[in-house]
Amino acid sequence: MAEVEENGRFHQISHEQDAGATFVLQSKGEWWHAGFHLTTAIVGPTILTLPYAFRGLGWGAGFLCLTVMGVVTFYSYYLMSLVLEHCEKSGRRHIRFRELAADVLGSGWMFYFVIFIQTAINTGISIGAILLAGECLQIMYSSLAPNGSLKLYHFIAMVTVIMILLSQFPSFHSLRHINLGSLLLSFGYTFLVVGACINAGVSKNAPRREYSLESSESARVFSAFTSISIMAAIFGNGILPEIQATLAPPATGKMLKGLIMCYTVIFLTFYSAAVSGYWVFGNKSNSNILKSLMPDEGPSLAPVWVLGLAIVFVLLQLFAIGLVYSQVAYEIMEKKSADVNKGIFSKRNLIPRIILRSLYVIFCGFVGAMVPFFGDINGVVGAVGFIPLDFVLPMLLYNMTYKPKKSSLVYWINNSIMIVFTCVGILGTFSSVRKLVFDAKKFKLFSSDVVD
């Protein structure tokens, strides 16, 4: 629905004239479709950075943080679904995060804060998806032609062209079958990588295992908060209201089923990838565990066909992730550029869609090629974007909507989570930006290597 600001609050008008809602956020899905969307939004190749996150925390703190992040995010997303259902029952069905926050909190500035953070998250993930897809192609190319002349930015350009073509899927709902495939792919490459790590760990070429943390106390603290920020980005899902919008109303109870599906996949994939990767490589874990399994020097630590198939699965899923996180940008574009009175595939709407979506993808590809900081981008996006949207706002929205008693356990749990993760977000932002600045010395523009 469209938003209208009135006396500091955002009220809704019919979305019949809202092309972004009508075309991009079609409300036709079932609960399992939401499960597919949620899984693609959370369970992606970023889980291959979990061993890298563990190296800044160690075994005990790594397990603790991974578990806490999982429990808190599930709880957070469930609370947000309850708030959305409450608003729907009262005749205020929200299909966008920004309008939900503005309506519940009664603040015009909150609308713009959320849309700014969402745009930063979605663009960052789109850039990261294209960058990692380009790196996957580069890895395959290097194994086939070790002395080849193609650079990372060449592969990023190839990925960008494919993403331009895929970006023309008109609606979020039209991605449901792609996202089912994405779910299956996440199982495929996770278990291939886990098997490869186990094989590497027991082989005669197994790397020396060291699990020590940074030598200085300050470096350990910064590394820990960077790792926590990366985990926040891995668990993050800054588009839950938009995913719930794809459900055919009424949405009551459907998102919980979708979340249970998603977190079942999370449990099976996250822990296995984190444990196996960190067990083998310890504090030498790369920001992409596939690169650890295929070192620049020495033999590959796993069968080439296993790693090759895993890379293909990762590559295919990255296209789905890029599509999912582009939907908010596309919805914003079409709300302003499309004519809801014309057909979705009419010339009037098709031409602007092709031009605007192509320009957006080209921009993401250009930035990814220019500044290839995959691990660092994860940390910054987690601290600056996902922590406020996923660990703070849902609790605040629930408290404002349901007004639990100050003596109730829910009230104290919600406020404790908000306080703790606000502090974590501030410290995580500082440590992640600090690492990004340090790593800036390691590369040149359009480098052929992804900086960890």
Image: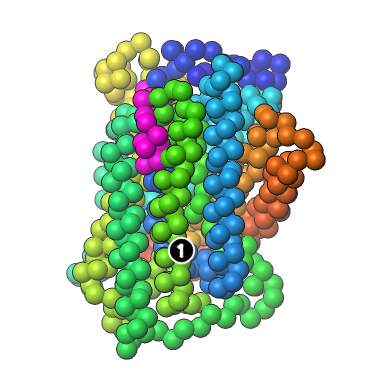
Q: Secondary structure at mark 1?
A: helix
List the single residue furthest toward the bottom.
204
Q: Is residue 119 visible?
A: no
What amino acid type is highlighted by mark number 1? Tyr
Numbered disc total: 1
Residue in the foreground of this view, choosing between 124 and 233: 233
Residue in the foreground of this view, choosing between 103 and 184: 184
List the single residue furthest toward the right.
407
Give, as a single range, the part of the protein colored magenta.
23-36
- Tell me the residue at 37%/15% (across/down): 339
Question: Can you give x and y, in whole percent of width and height, for residue 84 in the image?
Answer: 55, 29
Q: Is residue 144 visible?
A: yes
Question: Can you give x and y, in whole percent of width and height, for residue 20 in the image?
Answer: 43, 23
* Image-based side of 211 in relation to 449, left or right: right
Question: Can you give x and y, in whole percent of width and height, for residue 203 in the image?
Answer: 32, 85
Q: Is residue 408 magenta?
A: no
- Tell me the residue at 44%/60% (across/down): 270
From the viewer's perspective, is residue 256 above or below residue 338?
A: below
Residue pointed to by mark 1: 271
- Tell me the residue at 42%/71% (across/down): 277
* Image-based side of 338 in relation to 93, left or right: left
From the viewer's perspective, is residue 210 above or below residue 448?
A: below
From the viewer's perspective, is residue 251 above or below residue 161?
A: above
Q: Is residue 27 magenta?
A: yes
